[in-house]
Amino acid sequence: MIEYLNEITKIKALAGSPGKKAGAGMTGLQHAELAVRFHTTMPGYRVTPLAKLDQLAKSFGIAGIYVKDESCRFGLNAFKVLGGAFAIASLLAEKLGMDISRVSFDMLRSGEVRSRLGDAVFVTATDGNHGRGVAWTAEKLGFRSVVYLPKGAAAARVDAIREAGAEVIVTDLNYDDAVRLAARMAEEKGWWLVQDTAFEGYEKVPAWIMQGYTTMAAEAVEQLRLYGEQRPTHVFLQAGVGSMAGAVLGYLVNRYGADYPATIIVEPENAACIYKSAGSEDKKLCKAEGSLETIMAGLACGEPCPIAWEILRDYSDYYCTCPDYVAAKGMRILANPLGNDPKVVSGESGAVGAGLLAILMQNRELAAMRDSFGLDEKSVVLLFSTEGNTDPGNYRDVVWDGKYPSV
């Protein structure tokens, strides 16, 4: 593996060595079909936009840039509900002794189902978006939910989860310890844990969550086809614990086979557990230590999801870490489109891929890194803006007032 480092921009890149091994089977096309089928039964489902940024691509000297805009997913301002809802549906189907392929949202909120399942309580830990999705789904189905948040959680995210129907508890813990607290409370109280990361003895639900995320990837691939694109050449995937990145990458591997796009995994520099794992001896799982402080709250995770890591380990081409100003640059670029390009309202965790792409294409000092990625005039880049302005105050500070200026 080759490691690149630019001291001025503080961006690091580690080249992977994709082994194209086993590990992507749980995000296969058949799983995506099941997830899409279920999601289409949910109230308010519609395919989220794929923004085509022709003028931005032209300014960067590449063939195309496409941004999957998840800010309008079920009115929840983020993609996370796709995973939480499909996992809850799969869990309820299992409790009912039914196949998920025969389950609809309306069926799950019927009086008959409630009478069979009783007063179930769903519990999770979250930085915001996942918890809101779990709370919204539970409330729509007539169940209670309890959501734990780490210290420093933005008030807007806390309020959004509470408004979605959950009992909300803000802890004095970091994200990973909040996950352990939620798991312990589930065991003690008999609640049903719906967590978007796996740990020993807890893999089935996180796998369902990842399968739920493949709906987003399946939509994007079909939208690219409608735009006349055979496939993207590059995809930037931001990672916290890695579940979203692993789900999308796994889907793309299964969809395109050996021709799947070059994949760049992007993390905050202070919470780069995937990057550390990729650079470790024998690519063993590593934790990111310290405060994990970053404006990319959705990516502030110190411990990788083991089942997602198997996919990221075997198929990722590059792993990058970025300072906060990279995400801020991406937010400003997407909010201020060139020419007739559509505007994308993207939050801190959603915009970091766009910010990294911009810096790679604009900064001469990163030419070697850009060239190693194979980014050139033939490149078609797919980005996932996984959230909108979930912290409106900080969004305004960044986009209006220039907080976290570019270096």
Image (tube, rainbow, N blue to C red):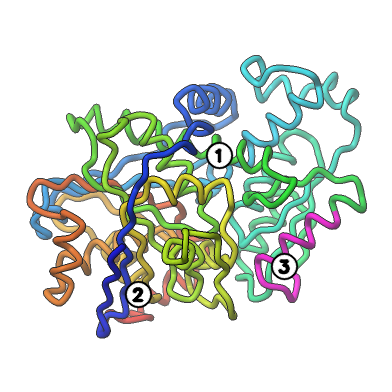
* Amino acid type, callout 2: Trp
Q: In this view, does 323 lie to the left or right of 244?
A: left
> Which of the pair 164/34 is nearer the observer?
34
- Answer with mark 3 or mark 1, whichever residue precedes in sequence: 1
Q: Is residue 10 left or right of residue 89?
A: left
* Amino acid type, callout 1: Leu
Please give the name of the residue rendered at 74% of the width and 24% of the height, measured from the top-left corner: 93
Q: Is residue 270 left or right of residue 327?
A: right
When the figure is inspected, residue 222 is found, relative to residue 23, above or below; the finding is above
Quarter of the image with the N terminus is bottom left
Q: Is residue 373 left or right of residue 306?
A: left
Please give the name of the residue rendered at 67% of the width and 64% of the height, measured from the top-left corner: 158
Could you give the CA–CA distance between mark 2 and mark 1, rounded to whole angstroms? Answer: 31 Å
What secondary structure is found at the residue carrying circle 2? loop
Nearer the viewer's eye, disc 2 or disc 1?
1
The numbered mark at residue 99 is none
- Answer with mark 2 or mark 1, whichever residue precedes in sequence: 1
Residue occupied by mark 2: 400
Residue occupied by mark 3: 177
Return the x and y of residue 343 as percentages of the image width and height.
Answer: 29, 53
> Which of the pair 199/150 is nearer the observer?
199
Return the x and y of residue 375 as percentages of the image width and height.
Answer: 15, 55
Q: Quadrant of residue 347?
A: bottom left
For label 2, the crowd category at 10 Å Cα-Cα, with few meaning under 14, some 14 to 19 and many 20 or more, is: few
Please give the name of the residue rendered at 31% of the width and 52% of the height, measured from the top-left corner: 317
* Amino acid type, callout 3: Asp
Bounds of the magenta segment: 171-185
Q: In which quarter of the image is residue 257?
A: top left
Could you give the CA–CA distance between mark 3 and mark 1, rounded to whole angstroms? Answer: 24 Å
Residue occupied by mark 1: 82
